[in-house]
Amino acid sequence: MIDPTGIANHSLVFDYSTLPREFKRRYLPRDLNFEWGDLNRVYEELGTRPLGSEPDLERWLLDEAEFDAYLYEQRAIRYFNSTRQTDNPAYTKAYEEYTQLLEPKIKLASFRLLQRYVVSQFRDQLPDSTYGLEDRRRENAVSIFREENVELEKKESDLSQKYYRTTGAMTVSFRGQERTLQQMSKFYEGTDRALREEAWRLSSRRALADSETLDTIYTEMVGLRDKIARNAGFGNYRDYIFVKKDRFDYTPDDCEEFHRGVEEAIVPLSRDIDRARAERMAVDTLRPWDLQVDPGGREALRPFDQVPDLVSGARKVMANVDTELSSYFERMVDLQLLDLDSRKGKAPGGYQEELAEVRLPLIFMNAVGKDDDVRTLLHECGHSFHTFLMGKAMLPFFNGGANMPNEFSEVASMSMEMITGEHYEGAFYDREDARRSNWKEAVDNVKLFTWVATIDAFQHWVYTHPAQTKDERVKAWVATFNRFCGLESYEGLESSRAYRWQRQLHLFEVPFYYIEYGIALTGALAVWSRYRNDPKDAIETYKSALSLGCARSLPELFEAAGVEWGFGPATLRKIAGELRSAIKVYGE
Ligand SMILES: [Zn+2]
């Protein structure tokens, strides 16, 4: 049953087999099942097929890419289902069976194919423009692989689970209800200062109660990661991860330049914003619970009531941005690829995921009627447009989810988030509220830069000082925090500040994944700035850059989007100037 808004009734099982299959299989059997016997037959064929010439190798790569897309889509379906209905045991079981039974086998078998590829004498004859970057990625992956690290990585992922279990169990009882710390964050937007303080202190105390457990987990993780790096022949884990993450286009030094640029250009702006905030709120000293509320004392923005209103608002916005992109949005609505409402049993958060074989995107989120929900949907739409445009381009390594560098995929999403903000008036808000929303977005971007610098600089220190004691680590954290922080005072809250890093899950779960947001934000702001000057041209270059998929280097992708590659002090000074004037204009 489909309701007239086109939003699926997700209490029903979503039937993926009804999705249009425009991209026909050329290699895989039509009746392939997602179970090891069938998959293994494909791996065996790819593992033994004679590769006696350059055309043989190219055919083999394309067949492997088709297989990868299939595997990626099957994983995505199981993940999507399990997050849509966490209380459906069949979905949970299907995803667990995948991660525990199939995924380790798939990883190993795929790695054997990589090894087969890198020893092929015909590698050098493949056309560089199509396969060059992929060739480097494969070479990289094989060069850092060490048998003895497999066991260490398993231990690392056990510790990861332990982190999730510890933080997932953090709840507090507030106003007669048990709430997660994530749910508590909504109280920081409330206009009652005493209530905000109470909520903040309660959450902070709860998090601190586990600080020692989390500290021990982190110490073990840092030790393990250092060992993994040394086994692979690196002096430290930072240098190892730059290779592992295929960071061909920038170095640790470039990241340090980014930190310096943020400190010089963005931090002063961030502190000016806080100064103005304190003045508007008429408080002598800002406290950590004063940073989310509207400084004018107005209630939080309410852009829509029900999910169908969110969809119709987004539809209006997209129609003003571009006809082609708008048609992609309509397609997602028609095919019921949006799961937007917040409901019992649904996992928290939001994401876009690709169904790589049918080359269609899925969007998952928990909309409750907040300004952030509109931003989230339009952000994920940016990722979806990437999926549509890459699919259309018929790239051999369409499997962007696995290969697409986040430094660029987040340009696609963040810039769409800002571009669409130009069209909120009449779709979600009146003029005043539209400006308020855009003011908040600009301020959030300033704060995001400072937080990215904090988290990234801290990790550089952590992994280049693997013998650190817990005290030394806290000292290094506080120094890093103070280098980039705003004007809020932590007087009497020193231990909350000292362990604030433990709440950033990336530090535990995906080490060194954070600078990507900073790099992408520089690109996204430049695309947005181009859009404000010449919307038509900016959208055309946006679309052509997205259709390049991951077959180009980061500087080439940025250039295709019409923006300069670089995230050092000079770029950040320019950005700070633009953000400062946007904040002034929207804030008036
Ligand atoms: Zn994103």
Image (tube, rainbow, N blue to C red):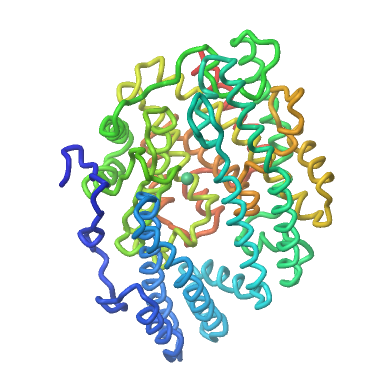
Residue at position x 62%, y 28% in the image: 202
How many marks are shown on the rendered structure?
0
Q: Position of residue 402 (x, y in %)?
A: 48, 61
Tell whether 218 sits left or right of 316: right
Q: For this rendering, which residue is in front, 320 or 490?
A: 490
Tell whether 9 sits left or right of 366: left
Q: For this rendering, which residue is in front, 249 or 341?
A: 341
Tell whether 204 sits left or right of 5: right
Residue 558 to residue 397: above or below: above
Residue 35 to residue 416: above or below: below
Q: Position of residue 95 (x, y in %)?
A: 41, 62
Residue at position x 66%, y 54% in the image: 250
- The residue lying furthest to the front in this view is 176
Residue at position x 53%, y 27% in the image: 174
Residue 99 to residue 81: above or below: below
Q: Quadrant of residue 566?
A: top right
Q: Quadrant of residue 46?
A: bottom left
Q: Position of residue 546 (x, y in %)?
A: 42, 51
Q: Position of residue 464 (x, y in %)?
A: 79, 55
Tell whether 503 sits left or right of 2: right
Q: For this rendering, which residue is in front, 426 or 419?
A: 426
Residue at position x 43%, y 50% in the image: 545
